[in-house]
Image (cartoon, rainbow, N blue to C red):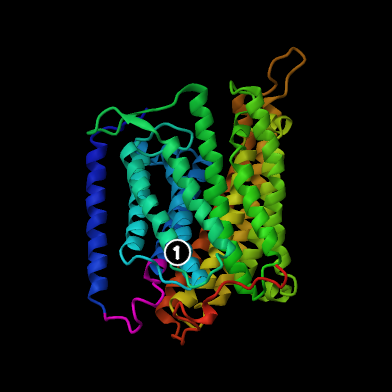
C-alpha cells in the first residue's frame, strides 16, 4: 500500500511532468533549427540520442552518487539533515539507489545499446522519434520516482517501488525500447547478431516482464497515489525477491555484459577470446539467474525447498558468471601492455575482475550457513557496492571514455591525466568502501549472535552501532573519493566536446566495412 505524503503529491508531480515536457519540447525545437546533416538520413548512423544519453547519464552519476555520500554520512553523523522529512535517511536512500541504478546505469545502457546495435548490425536506428521517446520517457520516470521518494510516496516494497502511474508509464517506454531494438536488428546489413546484442535484448525483455509482475497493483483511486499490491504475505516476498535479484541479473549484469563484450575487444583491438564461451555463458546466466531470488529469504516463512532451490542455483550460477569474467580477461592476452598504458582499458579490466569477485561472493553468501551470518548486515551492503562500484560503474566509465571521442568525432579525450586520476580515485574509493563494509558486516553478524553463559545476548543493538562508527566514516570517505572521480569524468567529457579539435571519423555509414563488430577468432 502506498504511503502518501502530505499535501498533493500527484499535483506536485504533475507540475514536474509539465516542466520536463516543456524542456524536452524546447530541446527538440532547438535541434530542428540546426543545419541539415551532410549525410543521408536514410543511411547514416543516428548518434544524437546516444550523445544526449551519455551526458544525462553523467549528470545522474554526479547527483545520485553525491546523494549516496550524503546517505553514508548520515549513518556516521545522523544530524546531517535539513528540516522536514524529505531529507531523512529513509527517503534519500531510495532516491540515491534508484538514481544510480536507473538514472546513471539505465541511461548508459540505453545510450550504449543504441551505439552498439547500429555498429554491430551496420544499420541505422529504425526510428527517428522513438529513440528520443525512449530516452526522455525513461528519464521522466526516473525524475517522477525520485521526487516521489522524497515526498514519501512509494508502494512500500523492498525496493521502494514508485507510484502505480509511474509504473504504467515505464511499461509504455520499455515496450517502445524493445520494439525499436528488434526493428533495428531486423533491418541489419550484417547477417550475424553479435553477442553483445544478445545480452542487451535479454536485459530489455526480461526487465519488462519483471517490472510488470512485481508492480501489479490496484489503485485505490485514479486521482491519488495510493494503491494496493496484487500479492500479499510470503507470495509478495517471493515476488519481490524474484524481481529484486533478477533486476541485478538482467539490469546490472546482462546489460553491462553487453557493454563489456563490445567495448573491451574494441579497445584492446583483440578478438573476443571465445565466442562459443560467450554464448554458453549467456544461456547459463539467463537460465540459472531466474531461480536464485529465494536465497534472500533464508530462515523465513518461505518453504524450505524453495530456499534450497535458490541456494543450489546460486552456486551453479558461478560457472557461467566466471565464464564471462574469464572470457574478458583472456581477451586481453597479448594486450596487457595496453592495459598498463591505457586507463580506459584498465577500467574495463578492473570491471571484469570485480565482476568475477562479486559473483563468487554472491554464490558464497547464498549458502544458508553463510547467509545466517551475513544477512541483514553491512556485509550485504559491501557485496552490493563491490558489484555496483567495481563492476557496473567501472565498465560504464570505461565505455564512456572509449565512445565519447568517436561520438563527437574528436582526436582524443581532453585530458588522459584526468582519466588516470579518475581510475585511481574510483579504485581507491571502491576498495575503501567495500573493505569497510565487509569488516562492519562480519563484526555486526558476530555481535548479534554472541550469547552469554546465561543465554542472553552479550551485546545490545546500540553496542553494535557504536562498533560500526569508524567503518561508517570510512564508507563515507570511500564514497567521496568515488564521487570525485565521477566529477572529473563529467568535466573531462564536457571539455572534450568543447575544446578538443575535430577529426575525420573512421566510419560514419552502416555500409562501411569498418563499422562491424569486434572480431570473432578463427574456428569460433
Quadrant of the image containing the C terminus: bottom right
Q: Residue furthest right?
A: 453
What residue sits 70% from the left and 30% below the top? 368
Q: Residue furthest bottom?
A: 504
**Which residues make up the magenta segment?**
35-50
Disc 1 marks which residue? 186
Q: Where in the figure is residue 117, as x and y percent of width and height?
A: 48, 66
In the rendered structure, the answer to whether residue 4 lies left or right of residue 440 reads left
Q: Where in the figure is residue 196, as x and y percent of width and height?
A: 56, 62
Location of residue 182 by image quarter: bottom left
Q: Where in the figure is residue 417, as x and y percent of width and height?
A: 58, 75
**Residue in the foreground of this view, choosing between 126 and 299:** 126
Main secondary-structure element of the magenta-colored stretch: loop
**Residue in the foreground of this view, choosing between 71 and 322:** 322
Q: Residues within 10 Å of mark 1 (few under 14, many from 20)?
A: few
Residue 430 visible in the current orientation? yes
321 magenta-colored:
no
Residue 80 visible in the current orientation? no
Location of residue 409 by image quarter: bottom left
What residue sits 66% from the left and 54% below the top? 281
Amino acid at each position: 500500500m502506498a504511503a502518501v505524503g502530505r499535501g498533493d503529491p500527484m499535483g506536485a508531480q504533475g507540475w514536474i511532468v509539465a516542466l520536463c515536457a516543456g524542456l524536452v519540447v524546447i530541446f527538440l525545437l532547438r535541434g530542428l533549427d540546426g543545419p541539415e546533416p551532410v549525410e543521408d538520413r536514410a543511411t547514416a548512423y543516428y548518434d544524437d540520442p546516444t550523445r544526449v544519453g551519455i551526458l544525462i547519464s553523467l549528470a545522474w552519476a554526479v547527483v545520485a552518487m553525491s546523494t549516496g555520500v550524503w546517505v553514508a554520512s548520515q549513518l556516521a553523523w545522523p544530524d546531517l539533515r535539513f528540516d522536514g522529512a524529505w531529507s531523512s535517511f529513509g527517503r534519500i536512500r531510495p532516491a540515491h539507489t534508484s538514481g544510480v541504478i536507473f538514472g546513471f546505469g539505465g541511461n548508459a545502457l540505453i545510450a550504449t545499446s543504441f551505439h552498439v546495435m547500429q555498429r554491430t548490425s551496420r544499420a541505422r536506428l529504425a526510428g527517428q522519434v522513438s529513440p528520443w521517446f525512449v530516452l526522455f520517457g525513461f528519464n521522466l520516470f526516473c525524475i517522477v520516482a525520485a521526487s516521489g521518494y522524497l515526498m514519501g510516496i512509494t508502494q512500500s516494497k523492498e525496493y521502494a517501488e514508485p507510484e502505480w502511474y509511474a509504473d504504467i508509464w515505464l511499461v509504455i517506454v520499455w515496450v517502445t525500447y524493445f520494439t525499436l531494438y528488434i526493428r533495428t536488428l531486423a533491418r541489419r546489413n550484417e547477417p550475424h547478431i553479435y553477442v553483445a546484442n544478445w545480452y542487451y535484448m535479454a536485459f530489455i525483455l526480461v526487465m519488462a516482464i519483471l517490472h510488470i509482475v512485481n508492480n501489479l497493483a490496484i489503485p485505490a483511486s485514479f486521482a491519488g497515489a495510493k494503491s494496493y499490491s496484487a500479492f500479499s504475505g510470503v507470495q509478495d516476498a517471493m515476488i519481490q525477491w524474484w524481481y529484486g535479484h533478477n533486476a541485478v541479473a538482467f539490469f546490472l549484469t546482462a546489460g553491462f555484459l553487453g557493454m563489456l563484450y563490445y567495448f573491451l575487444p574494441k579497445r584492446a583491438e583483440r578478438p573476443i577470446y571465445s565466442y562459443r564461451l560467450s554464448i554458453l555463458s549467456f544461456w547459463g546466466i539467463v537460465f540459472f539467474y531466474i531461480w536464485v531470488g529465494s536465497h534472500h529469504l533464508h530462515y523465513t516463512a518461505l518453504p524450505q525447498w524453495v530456499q534450497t532451490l535458490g541456494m543450489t542455483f546460486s552456486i551453479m550460477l558461478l560457472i557461467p558468471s566466471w565464464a564471462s569474467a574469464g572470457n574478458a580477461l583472456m581477451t586481453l592476452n597479448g594486450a596487457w601492455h595496453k592495459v598498463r598504458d591505457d586507463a580506459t582499458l584498465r577500467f574495463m579490466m578492473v570491471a571484469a575482475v570485480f565482476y568475477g569477485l562479486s559473483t563468487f561472493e554472491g554464490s558464497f553468501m547464498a549458502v544458508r550457513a553463510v547467509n545466517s551470518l551475513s544477512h541483514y548486515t553491512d556485509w550485504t551492503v559491501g557485496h552490493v557496492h563491490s558489484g555496483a562500484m567495481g563492476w557496473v560503474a567501472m565498465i560504464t566509465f570505461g565505455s564512456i571514455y572509449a565512445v565519447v571521442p568517436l561520438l563527437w568525432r574528436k582526436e582524443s579525450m581532453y585530458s588522459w591525466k584526468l582519466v588516470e586520476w579518475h581510475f585511481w580515485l574510483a579504485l581507491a574509493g571502491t576498495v575503501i568502501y567495500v573493505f569497510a563494509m565487509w569488516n562492519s558486516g562480519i563484526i555486526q553478524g558476530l555481535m548479534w549472535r554472541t550469547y552469554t553463559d546465561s543465554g542472553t545476548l552479550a551485546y545490545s543493538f546500540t553496542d553494535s552501532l557504536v562498533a560500526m562508527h569508524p567503518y561508517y566514516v570510512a564508507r563515507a570517505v570511500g564514497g567521496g573519493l568515488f564521487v570525485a572521480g565521477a566529477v572529473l569524468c563529467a568535466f573531462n567529457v564536457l571539455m572534450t566536446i568543447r575544446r578538443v579539435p575535430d577529426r575525420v571519423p573512421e566510419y560514419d555509414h552502416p555500409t562501411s566495412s569498418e563499422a562491424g563488430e569486434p572480431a570473432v577468432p578463427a574456428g569460433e
